[in-house]
Image (tube, grey):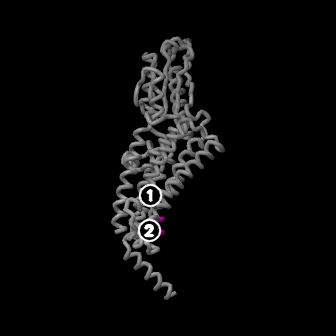
Amino acid sequence: MRRIAHLMRKEFLELRRDPRLFFIVILAPIIQLTMLGYAASTDVRDVPVVVVDADRSSESRALVSRFEASQNFVVVDTLPSLDDIIAYLDDGRAWMALAIPYDYGERVRRGQPTTVQVVADGTDASSTNVAMGYAGSLVASYARDLAAATRSGAAVPSVGADVRVWFNPQLESRVFMIPGILALLLLAVTTNLSSMAVVREKERGTLEQLNVTPLARWELITGKLLPYAVLGMLDVLLVVAVAVGWFAVPLRGSLLLLLAMCFVYLLTTLGLGLFVSTISATEQQAMVTTSFFFLLPMVFLSGFIFPIENMPAPIQSVTFLIPLRYFLIILRGIFLKGVGLEVLWPQALAMLVWGIGILTLATLRSSKTLS
């Protein structure tokens, strides 16, 4: 036991001498637990709603006021016609639209049955189911209050909700998840592979041999990363073929645009992996850094598992720094909504800027490492 105790003491001393290990073992879990603890919420709150009120009566305003007063909904805009809701649902500014017909108030006053239309974005099946339940309950509660307020002997008005689901009418969860899985596979494969690009040369002792080659620094880095980019694009083609051919996920948008956006996304993952490679001493350290400090937070804070809109405001601000957030919006927009760059250009631009930035930083660090 004494020999084991001496060996344990030696290991603890090694941990104390290496501040990076101390950070990984002690501080990093606390930071991640704090961030992810706030982010990990499957509750659906503050559903953004647009309203099309063709009636503009006191009765229709009373119904809209119910949505505005609800903790589950946020009315983001009032639109003149149903045609205008398409842009809001396409770019994600609204998850749901409430359309009130022109004769709504008159029918309520006469005690006749009437129906309001609720249009929901069905890309996220689980969140849409919950939001539809909220909307149905709210309309039903409003109808009960109307009935209770009706004078004795008068006709009782009946208000119902006609719910329609766009983009994913059957509310199939795999239609929402599989495009996200494509993003996760690209992130995991290309980041882990490229994170070993420079550190492998360090471990093998071949870094000095690369320094004496006539290759320029950018040529060396390009030659290191291009094979992983090719593998990444092959993965994209394979996953898209399986998603569409086997799982029947609809590809409503342009395949060429999808491939172009995947290539832009690869700039971010390869650049991130190369950056990790320059700050790591061993392949094992590169793997731990990539998985623990980058992959895990990106998965939790990108909107893949938990809706970003339900996270606290400070955590939502952090998600803007995560390229996976933008890529998920792009993938689901192309696959499920069939939209193009006219809608997705903000996410595409953010991803491109992120990719160029991390590649530039990684290249500068690689040049210093190689020197």
Q: Please give the name of the residue rendered at 37% of the width and 45% of the height, measured from the top-left corner.
A: 313
Is 239 on the left-hand or right-hand side of 4?
right
Name the outermost residue toward the right. Answer: 246
Residue identified by numbered label 2: 199
Q: Position of residue 39 (x, y in %)?
A: 44, 50
Between 97 and 104, which is closer to the camera in this rendering?
97
Give the residue at x 60% y 49%.
238
Q: Main secondary structure of the magenta part?
A: helix
Bounds of the magenta segment? 283-288
On-image quarter of the C terminus: bottom left
Answer whether residue 312 is visible to the viewer in this image. no
- In the image, residue 241 above or below residue 121: below
Residue visible at 52% across and 87% down in the picture: 1
Q: Is residue 285 magenta?
A: yes
Q: Are marks 1 and 2 in contact (CB under 8 Å)?
A: no
Circle number at residue 192? none
Q: Which residue is mark 1?
A: 294
Q: Nearer the viewer, residue 64 or 216?
A: 216
The crowd level at tag 1 (other Cα within 10 Å; few <14, some 14-19, many 20+) is some
Q: Position of residue 119 (x, y in %)?
A: 52, 28
Can residue 110 be seen here? The reply is yes
Q: Is the residue 304 above or below the residue 64 in the image?
A: below
Q: Residue furthest bottom?
A: 2
For badge 2, the amino acid type reads Val
Image x and y of residue 317, in percent: 37, 47
Residue 289 colored magenta?
no
